[in-house]
Image: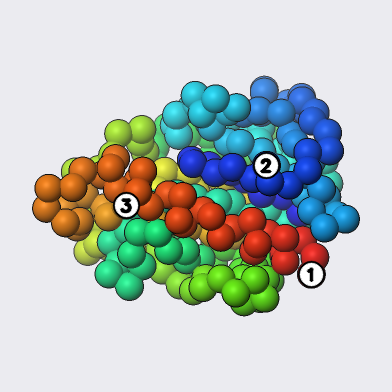
Amino acid sequence: MLAVMCGSGIDLFSFELVRCRQVDTPYGAMSAELQWLRVGGKELLTLRRHGEQHQIPPHRVNFRANLWGLRECGVSHCLALHAVGTLDPEFPPGTLRMPIQLIDYTYGREHSFVDGTAELVHVDFENPFDGELIQQVAVAADAAGVVLPVGGVYGVTQGPRLETAAEIDRLGQDGCTMVGMTAMPEAGLARELGVAYASCAVAVNWAAGRGPAGEGIHSQILRHAEAGFGSLAGVLAKWVGL
């Protein structure tokens, strides 16, 4: 079963909604009902990580429940959609990219299913995003005629506030090319559960201090989000059909 984890500004309901289900987990409630969509004769499972009304801030998302519930419903591959700020002039707002690395700056989140009640496991996280899944989605994008480069480093910040210009300068010095708030602990938890996980990042604004003078970040998001997310339905349809 394939799944899409949805984030900010994303509407996938051009696809037919087949059914919904609330899934209970040992880790509490998932962010929202799971929704099965029909895509070209096949089904795609979706979950809105911020809730149905986009009410759950990044640091309050129950990532463990979300990933556990997906796995319990038979999900083997999860494509996470992320709205990000960009530090890279070659990744301007309104375009897509699949990062291959991340740096985690978050704190206070439940980062692991390993909690002292079971065998201690150290998962290999050298490459946090699944390479085979990245290639599948890249092939699907090419088939859909969508430009979707592979590469870059996702810096995961705590939120919900946006970053200062000095913080973005630090992220840039660390090697980050984009910044968002939800790839961790999502990616790490997926790895612990054996779920192949990759990110499709949509640049919706320039990171703080990197954009044109006089244009606020929120106005950039309003201007670029629709263009960036508009091409994803075609990519997903091709991916599900592979």
- Quarter of the image for residue 160 reads top left
Q: Is residue 123 above or below residue 116?
A: below
**Circle 1 residue:** 242
Real-space Cα separation, disc 1 to disc 3, in angstroms: 32 Å
* Spot occupied by residue 125 in the image (x, y as percentages of width and height): 55, 61
Q: Residue furthest right?
A: 41
The three-letter code of the residue at mark 1 reads Leu
* Nearer-N-terminus badge (1/2): 2
Residue drawn at 86 percent across, 55 percent down: 42
Judge whether 219 appears above or below 103 on screen.
Answer: above
Q: Which residue is mark 3?
A: 205
Of tags 1 and 2, which is closer to the observer? 2
The earlier-in-sequence mark between 1 and 3 is 3
Q: Residue at x 27, y 55 (%)?
A: 206
**Pointer 1 local density, CA inside 10 Å: few below 14, some 14–19, many at least 20:** few
Give left or right: position of 173 versus 49.
left
CA neighbours of label 2 inside 10 A, class few (<14), some (14 to 19), many (20+): few
> What's the residue type where badge 3 is placed?
Asn
Label at residue 212:
none
Q: Are marks 1 and 2 in contact (CB under 8 Å)?
A: no
